[in-house]
Image (cartoon, helix red, strand yellow):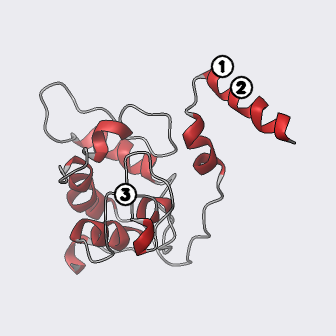
Amino acid sequence: MKWASSLVVVAASLVGISVGSLGHAAAPLPAAKAGVALDYEFFKTRVQPVFLLKREGHGRCYVCHSNNNARFHLVMLSPGATSWNEAQSKQNFELIKRVAVPGSIDSPIVMHPLDEKAGGHPHHGGGQQFESQSDPAWQTLKGFVLGEKVASR
């Protein structure tokens, strides 16, 4: 079967897919919890700013995730803009559903950027953005998938 993995690498490079993202793109998502919904206003006002936040020793999530082939992708900001407009935010909300499973802390958007030592996934191309589960930005991502609403925080 060694030839099969080589074939995947060749095929991925022919169609321009990042080989590093293949393992994560193919990983199944956890099951959604009944009765939990992702809140658009919470996403727009609390989660999107996390993607634009400059973290010491790391690039902003936006820099890579607006120019990548990974499962999670963000819409490009308009020229000169420092945040997304309403239409772009709605697009981002649809895109995050690829990695945010309602009611599941095991969602890739929560566990992928978390340091492996803190319980996160072992590989994130942009490095582990959050060193611990007590990081306020990580808590925001967790709250989002668990169904927090703007008024509830």
Residue 18 position in % (x across, y down): 55, 33
Query: In the figure, residue 4 lies in which quadrant?
Result: top right
Name the residue nearer the viewer: 74 or 64: 64
Name the residue nearer the viewer: 87 or 49: 49
Quick check: 99 above or below 146? above
Task: Describe residue 96's horizontal placement relative to residue 44 as left or right.
Answer: right
Residue 138 position in % (x across, y down): 30, 67
Crowd class of label 1 (few under 14; some 14 to 19; many from 20; radius 10 Å): few
Circles 2 and 3: CB distance less than 8 Å? no
Distance in Å between CA atoms under marks 3 and 1: 29 Å
Crowd class of label 2 (few under 14; some 14 to 19; many from 20; radius 10 Å): few
- Callout 3: helix, strand or loop? loop
Question: What residue sits right under mark 2 in the picture?
Answer: 11
Look at 58% across and 50% down and name the residue there: 24
Q: What kind of residue is marked 1? A: Leu
Name the residue nearer the viewer: 85 or 123: 123
Residue 14 - label: 1
Look at 51% across and 65% down and name the residue there: 101
Question: What residue sits right under mark 3 in the picture?
Answer: 128
Distance in Å between CA atoms under marks 2 and 3: 28 Å
Look at 21% across and 39% down and name the residue there: 85
The mark that comes first in sequence, 2 or 3, is 2
Position of the N terminus, as image quadrant, is top right
Quick check: 53 above or below 13? below
Crowd class of label 3 (few under 14; some 14 to 19; many from 20; radius 10 Å): many
Residue 11 position in % (x across, y down): 71, 25
Circles 2 and 1: CB distance less than 8 Å? yes
- Callout 1: helix, strand or loop? helix
Q: What kind of residue is marked 3? A: Gln
- Callout 2: helix, strand or loop? helix
Q: What kind of residue is marked 2? A: Ala
